[in-house]
Image: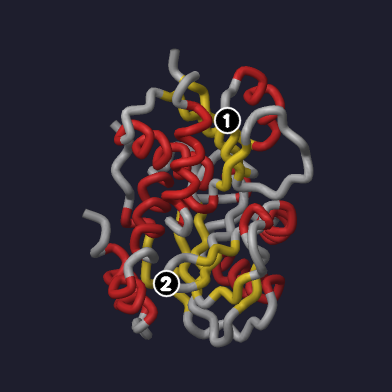
Amino acid sequence: MAAKVIVACGSGVATSQTVASKISRLLKQRGVEADVEAVDIKALKHAIKDADAYVSIVKSDEEFTIPVFNGVAFLTGMGQDAELDALVAAIKDK
Amino acid sequence: MAAKADTSLFKPELVFFDFEATTRDELFSELGARLDAQGYIKDTWYEAVTTRERKYPTGLQTPTLALAIPHADPQYLERPYIAIVKPKVPIEFEAMAGIGDPVDARLIINLGVLRDGGQVEVLQTLMNIFMDDGAAAGIMAQDTPEGMVSAITEHFA
């Protein structure tokens, strides 16, 4: 089964879609099957229920029960490889 | 297939080098006045963009320079646009996702994009530009609106 990865931003329009599309492409290159979904922050609580990883581009003090990754890295490319490695490790067996 | 990026959103009339702003709010106020005069935004835009920036900051430290990509939700727009501001002095923006220190943004790219408006391609291409020293330097060297538009749009294949 493919892993489910959630990306959230304030509106679900520009930033989260861009990060989701990039992660989707990078995972495919690594041969990892995953559904990567961009949502707005209001839909996060619901979307995260059956997700395997959460990629965040908003400030949050909330605790999550699934692994959380730094979405800004995928936007700017700074620290992207390390973040991708961690994401792959977290979801590859899902 | 994803929609192709619409480079017509970049326009010389939406490139600004003359802003006197020294703070975010001043910047949004100057930008709002220009965008409003050209009919791009609703009069609720200023409130929306400043509120959103406080809640979801958009400062980004890229490999080449610090920038910010503030945006308001689509319902505050009259029509889509992308505005570029190279302020006279860097403007402090909080870092996106609260990760890292605030950034002194030397370039502000205001994404006035609607849902399904090719925003993914636009933002992705912009981010790729700022991963490349030469491309970023080429953009920061511009001092005319026309030059800025072509320096950016040449990266959209």
Q: What residue appears at the point 64 percent right and 63 percent down from the top-left corner?
A: B100
x and y, in percent, of residue B51 in the image? 74, 56
| View extreme (left): residue | B157
Relative to A49, is B53 above or below?
Answer: below
Query: In this orientation, which residue lies closer to the viewer: A83 or A34?
Result: A83
Badge 1: residue crowd in 10 Å (few <14, some 14–19, many ≥20): many
Disc 1 marks which amino acid? Ala
**Residue A4 numbered mark, or none:** none
Find numbered disc 1 in the image and state the secondary structure of the residue it sits on: strand
Relative to B69, is B139 above or below?
Answer: below
Q: In the rendered view of the protein, which quadrant contains the N terminus of chain A? A: top left
Q: What residue appears at the point 41 percent right and 44 percent down from the top-left corner?
A: B120
Q: Nearer the viewer, mark 1 or mark 2?
A: 1
Task: Name the image colouring.
Answer: secondary structure
Find numbered disc 2 in the image and state the secondary structure of the residue it sits on: loop
Cα separation between marks 1 and 2:
29 Å
Query: In this orientation, which residue lies closer to the viewer: A79 or B78?
Result: A79
Identify the residue under disc 2: B64
x and y, in percent, of residue B105 in the image? 56, 74
Disc 2 marks which amino acid? Thr
Locate residue B36: give its quadrant.
bottom right
Relative to B142, is A26 above or below?
Answer: above
Q: Are marks 1 and 2 on the same chain?
A: no
x and y, in percent, of residue B153 in the image? 28, 63
Identify the residue under disc 1: A53
x and y, in percent, of residue B3 in the image? 32, 38
Q: Chain of mark 1?
A: A
